[in-house]
Amino acid sequence: MSDIKVVTRFAPSPTGFMHVGGVRTALYAWLLARKNQGTFILRIEDTDKEREVEGSIEHIKESLKWLGLNWDDFCIQSERLDIYKKYADRLLEKGFAYSDGGALRFKIIEKKRTQWHDLVWGDLSAGEEALEDFILIKSDGYPTYNFAHIVDDIEMGVTHVVRGQEFISSTPKFLSVYEALGITPPFFVTTPPILGEKGTKKLSKRDGAKDILDYKKEGYLPETMINYLAFLGFNPGGEREVYTPEELIKVFDLSKIQRSGAKWSDDKLNWMNKEHMKLLPLKEIEKNIFEFLSEDMRNPKLVPIIFERISKWGEVKDMVERGELDFFFNLPSVPKEKLVYKNSTPEKTTSNLKLAVQALQNIDEDNFTAENVKSALMLIAETLPKRGELLHPVRYALSGLDNSPDPFIIAYILGKNETLSRLQKAF
Ligand code: GLU
């Protein structure tokens, strides 16, 4: 591919929703252009005015920007009507078009079998029934998709048409337009379908297919979406699965796009998001977590324990809503009977807690780290028949929860004074 300048395009219709399938098409076109130092065009195909949804163009741009899929050129088809007209006139002159009820139709001169090559699907063919006259320009003056996209791909020098498989059945018609115009068609790159979690049918809204910006709202990273969507139907080979966008550009290879459908998996997406979150600098992690915390909750010491429990930023909000962080800020209620570990007794529990207080008093405030708290408490716990006889009441006294983060970390976060005060209040 080194002797040609690669030009690709993403050509969405402004009909609302930016589905993950559309995003993956855009991504492959973008990767192909970037890999080859080519050009990536964003073209808005708005010639079907009835289907247009207000605000879609902004929505598409915002989605691509969030993902980092930057475009080099941008155009809107409805602003290019004179260009389609010029091409239509050319077909009319050559006898490949005729007027019909206010519209202009393409005339199939020879019904024949069509054969073509797709860079993903290989050699394809269709019988003559795939060819019939079709509308080029509608009676409202707007071109059809079937015509406009060909004119634009020619005018813009598009070398690779990357799009979904729903366009394969119309490809014979597209090829007859190229032939009538005497122009060599571009390479076709047909992406595989994205299947729902069960793997039986195409991912649909019912399976939870969402607008790409919903993933943003939920707190997924854009680099996760790029990585995840790239791998739905593509694999560079090997075991590795976590790639940054820059690394993906390097390994992207058309010959490694699969033809068979790729299954969506939320679990996989969440796993991958966590992997990308781990690649971020601590400050960035803190910033993202703090966004979901009210100002008075923004304690940097909380960051590691929150981070451990989430696979996307939005889950911080869930933790707050479930009250899982409340005990850090408010004294928990600690019913006495809940302090007692399994077969232990209230007396033993009280004496163990007293021992804990004594041990912790000996650590000075500056050294009140999770490690030091742990060493001090473990020294006592190891002398008891069961460690839980000390660790359970400590955990409970500090958090009011049976299942909470590590009690040593809680003590560190609360600090020496608050830790001692909670332990003392408990007996
Ligand atoms: N406007 C078409 C769509 O949104 C684009 C198809 C193509 O890429 O040629 O499906």
Image (cartoon, rainbow, N blue to C red):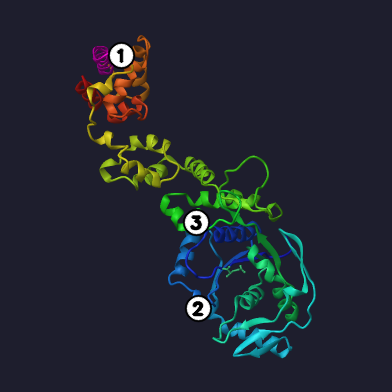
Give the residue pinned by disc 2: 49
Residue beneath the point at 58% across and 46% down: 243
- Judge: label 2 CB < 8 Å from ligand 1: no
**Are discs 2 and 1 less than 8 Å apart at CB?**
no
Give the residue pinned by disc 3: 206
Of 373 and 107, nearer the camera is 107
Give the residue pinned by disc 1: 344
Q: Position of residue 348 (x, y in %)?
A: 27, 12
Answer with mark 1 or mark 3, whichever residue precedes in sequence: 3
* Secondary element type, mark 3: helix
Residue 232 visible within the image: no
Q: Which residue range is magenta in the image? A: 343-361
- Quadrant of residue 163 in the image? bottom right
* Secondary element type, mark 2: helix
Answer with mark 2 or mark 1, whichever residue precedes in sequence: 2
Give the quarter the ligand 1 occupies: bottom right
Q: CA distance from mark 1 to mark 3?
A: 52 Å
Q: On screen, 39 above or below 397? A: below
**Amino acid type indicated by mark 1:** Ser
**Amino acid type indicated by mark 2:** Lys
Q: Quadrant of the N terminus?
A: bottom right
Residue 57 visible within the image: yes
Q: On screen, 49 above or below 61? A: below
Q: CA distance from mark 2 to mark 3?
A: 27 Å
Assess whether residue 353 is covered by the magenta stretch: yes
Q: CA distance from mark 2 to mark 1?
A: 75 Å
Q: Which mark is residue 319?
A: none
- Quadrant of residue 8 in the image? bottom right
Q: Position of residue 14 (x, y in %)?
A: 50, 70
